[in-house]
């Protein structure tokens, strides 16, 4: 028996041998803090062979993707998912499909062309091995009609087709909750299948962004499904959250200050050069990851604010001059208003155990995984359409299940804009009209989302939601947090106003070469357009700051926030009824 056992372990094509090969390659793949691309093919091949040799059952993943009028983003997301399956072979392939991976497209579009395109994408990827279900507006309404109206109203608010019969743009939180009801149905059809639900955003991909000496690269180098399956197999976790790399997961409303600092630093560097000099902007500064460096108020989340400006890393290739870099950077500035942060892009940093877990407190709504039992955690306060709904949900989940809410170093690639336009296909709360961009709606939802988040955090410290505080306590908490947030936002506003003044003076200085050379007119015009939009949204007459400091506006928001928190226990009961 012992000799047979030894023989099995020594078998170079055994399960154990493949795991050993993966464990040996993985640290080398990421040695020196970057990616050795030559090792990627054998690394992926070892996983594919491991799946062929698998004897133990593995989880089936149902990936749910809410999408609203974003066919290009959705196509990139699904394309990266197919690439992930082909590269790592999770669950193997049977009868031309990947049986352990399926997709639910939760369509919240208003545009009929987008809905049709999303449906065609579902059919295309199903033909190519990814069973993909397009959960469109008609099917959503059919599902909702089968549920008790009173309970639905508590979770979704006044959620009904408009006068033209359109059932789109309900908001990501409402759409996710409707999708969760569909997931419950899907789970009931596979009672003997170990299932995991994987919530992602349509503007994300199953890749990571890595920094290399040749510039940033987006690669299929993390086997998401393998590590998630291992985590949920060996632990009793109910909910797991990842994070994102690439573009930040937050609104421009809370990134304006540090981006202005970086733009000022870039112009100062340009002022010290000549337009014909070779570009000097390809060396990256060394910055620690995981510091939320893109966020103006990173301290709110336990991170230290960045002490200095971040240097822009030029993405042009081939021989080019400083003037070329300046023009390229100037043309990227407008993408900031759609969520890009050209100077503070985050990269994947390998850890020794991608499958290692640690306690979590924030749900990244675009990258979290849960067992069917985790369906009990709906997106709270969906009808208010607040930003920060994921972190708010995270505080509630942490309060209820503690150590069974975890995080892992399994980030997805986040890409706010499409390459062809530098803009988002659709972004609620961002209005653009002939170059003029208005963020005040998103700004206001961000501010009150922060008020809700940190109110829930304070209440959770005293036992919420397991213990319901009095209405008076909730009201007092909201008032206190709102006051604290106002101080934070207004201090940031003062900083932004000072930086806008510095940027205007630097940009308009007639001594600088870009103002003395007619060939730079388009570059200067792009910069001036950026300054105009920053001034419109964050300047002295900013409608966003006026709204968050308005007593009248607070009287409009306060009752809804208060009622939402007071009603949360009843909403939870209603949700359980809907699931049942």
Image: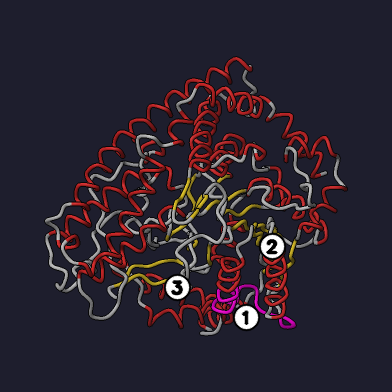
- In this figure, which residue is indicated by the disc labeled 2? 105
Cβ atoms at labels 1 and 2 below 8 Å apart: no
The residue that mark 1 highlights is 52
Q: Quadrant of residue 60?
A: bottom right
Query: For this rendering, which residue is in front, 232 or 580?
Result: 580
Compute the Cα span from label 1 to label 2: 29 Å
In the rendered image, the vertical position of residue 133 relative to residue 542, given as above or below: below
- Answer few, some or many: residues within 10 Å of disc 3's Cα (few below 14, many 20 plus, some between 14 and 19): some
Can residue 10 be seen here? The reply is: yes
* Residue 471 forms part of the magenta stretch: no
In this picture, which residue range is highlighted in magenta? 81-96
Q: Secondary structure at mark 2?
A: strand
Q: Residues within 10 Å of mark 1 (few under 14, many from 20)?
A: some
Q: Going by the image, does 376 lie left or right of 227?
A: right
**Residue 187 image point, x, y percent:** 77, 57
* In magenta segment, residue 82: yes
**N-terminal label among 1 and 3:** 1
- Of 546 and 96, nearer the camera is 546
First in sequence: mark 1 vs mark 2: 1
The picture places residue 66, in percent across and down from the top left corner, at 65, 57
Q: Which quadrant of the rendered structure holds the C terminus? A: top right
Above or below 452: residue 261: below
């Amino acid at each position: 028996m012992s000799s047979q056992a030894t023989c099995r372990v020594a078998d170079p094509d055994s399960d154990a041998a493949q795991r050993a090969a993966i464990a040996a390659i993985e640290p080398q793949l990421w040695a020196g803090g970057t990616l050795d691309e030559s090792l990627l093919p054998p690394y992926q091949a070892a996983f594919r062979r491991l799946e062929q040799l698998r004897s133990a059952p593995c989880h089936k993943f149902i990936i749910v993707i809410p999408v609203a009028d974003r066919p290009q983003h959705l196509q990139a997301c699904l394309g990266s998912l197919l690439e992930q399956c082909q590269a790592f072979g999770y669950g193997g392939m049977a009868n031309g499909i990947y049986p352990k991976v399926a997709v639910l497209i939760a369509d919240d579009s208003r545009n009929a062309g987008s809905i049709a395109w999303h449906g065609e994408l579902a059919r295309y990827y199903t033909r190519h091995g990814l069973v993909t279900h397009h959960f469109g507006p008609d099917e959503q309404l059919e599902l909702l009609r089968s549920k008790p109206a009173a309970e639905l109203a508590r979770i979704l608010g006044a959620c009904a087709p408009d006068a033209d019969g359109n059932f789109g743009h309900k908001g990501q939180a409402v759409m996710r909750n409707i999708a969760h009801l569909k997931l419950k149905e899907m789970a009931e059809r596979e009672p003997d299948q170990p299932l995991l639900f994987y919530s992602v955003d349509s503007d994300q991909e199953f890749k990571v962004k890595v920094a290399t000496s040749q510039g940033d690269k987006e690669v299929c180098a993390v086997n998401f499904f393998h590590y998630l399956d291992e985590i949920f197999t060996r632990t009793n976790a109910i909910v797991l959250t990842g994070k994102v790399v690439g573009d930040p997961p937050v609104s421009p409303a809370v990134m304006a200050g540090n981006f202005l600092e970086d733009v000022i630093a870039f112009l100062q560097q340009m002022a010290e050069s000549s337009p014909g000099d070779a570009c000097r902007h390809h060396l990256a500064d060394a910055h620690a990851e995981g510091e939320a460096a893109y966020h103006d108020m990173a301290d709110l989340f336990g991170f230290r604010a960045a002490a200095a400006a971040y240097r822009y890393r030029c993405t042009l290739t081939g021989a080019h001059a400083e003037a070329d870099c300046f023009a390229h950077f100037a043309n990227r500035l407008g993408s900031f208003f759609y969520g890009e942060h050209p100077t503070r892009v985050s990269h994947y940093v390998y850890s020794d155990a991608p499958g290692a877990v640690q306690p979590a407190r924030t749900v990244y709504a675009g990258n979290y995984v849960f067992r069917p039992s985790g369906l009990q955690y709906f997106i709270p306060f969906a009808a208010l359409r607040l930003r920060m709904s994921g972190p708010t949900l995270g505080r509630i989940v942490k309060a209820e299940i503690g150590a069974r809410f975890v995080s892992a170093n399994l980030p997805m690639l986040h890409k706010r804009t499409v390459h062809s336009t530098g803009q988002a296909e659709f972004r609620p709360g961002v209005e653009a009209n002939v170059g003029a961009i208005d963020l005040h709606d998103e700004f206001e939802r961000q501010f009150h989302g922060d008020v809700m988040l940190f109110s829930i955090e304070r209440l959770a410290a005293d036992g919420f939601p397991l213990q319901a505080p009095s209405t008076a306590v909730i009201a007092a908490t909201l008032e206190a947090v709102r006051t604290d947030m106002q101080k934070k936002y207004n201090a940031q506003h003062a900083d932004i106003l000072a930086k806008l003044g510095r940027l205007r003076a630097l940009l308009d200085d007639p001594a600088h070469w870009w103002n003395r050379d007619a060939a730079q007119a388009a570059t200067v015009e792009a910069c001036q357009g950026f300054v105009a939009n920053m001034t419109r949204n964050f300047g002295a007459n900013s409608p966003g700051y006026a709204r968050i400091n308005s007593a009248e506006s607070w009287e409009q928001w306060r009752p809804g926030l208060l009622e939402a928190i007071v009603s949360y226990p009843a909403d939870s009961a209603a949700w359980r009824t809907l699931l049942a």
